[in-house]
Image (spheres, rainbow, N blue to C red):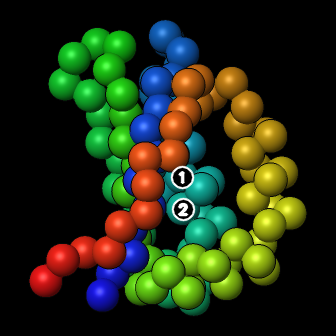
Amino acid sequence: MTHVRIWKFRPPPGRERDFALAYGADGVWAALFAKARGYLGTSLHRPDQPGGWWLTIDRWSSAGDFEAFSQAHDEAYRTLDQELEGLSGKEEFVGAFEEAD
């Protein structure tokens, strides 16, 4: 069963393009996640209305694979999060889910 982790973001006005480059399927977050076993990819969804929330959906083979990534790459995760401070604007973890069959 596939494990997904969903975040929502509201990047600062005028920074949407930079945000999309960093947080999209080929961005720096995806590159970090790709170092781990079980990472299946990231999709980025832009709002249909100006000023709305953007969503990222990170897909993993299992919750265990995500937890192993978190333990092995905690320092790199925190460093990248600090480097991108301000680019994500408002952010909120929506939750972790298992895909239903």
Q: Nearer the viewer, residue 21 or 100?
A: 100
Residue 1 in the image: above or below residue 43? below
Quarter holding residue 52? top left
Cα gap from disc 2 to disc 1, whole angstroms = 5 Å
Residue 36 in percent (x, y) is at 62, 82
Residue 58 in percent (x, y) is at 43, 63
Residue drawn at point x = 19 percent, y = 25 percent: 48
**Which mark identifies residue 43?**
none
For the C terminus, give its image quadrant: bottom left
Residue drawn at point x = 25 percent, y = 75 percent: 99
Residue 42 in percent (x, y) is at 41, 61
Looking at the image, residue 94 sits to the left or right of residue 89; the answer is left
Quarter holding residue 30? bottom right
Residue drawn at point x = 63 percent, y = 79 percent: 67
- Are discs 2 and 1 less than 8 Å apart at CB? yes
Q: Can residue 90 be seen in the rendering of this structure?
A: yes
Q: Nearer the viewer, residue 82 or 27?
A: 82
Q: Which residue is mark 1?
A: 27
Judged from the image, the secondary structure of the residue bearing numbered disc 2 is: helix
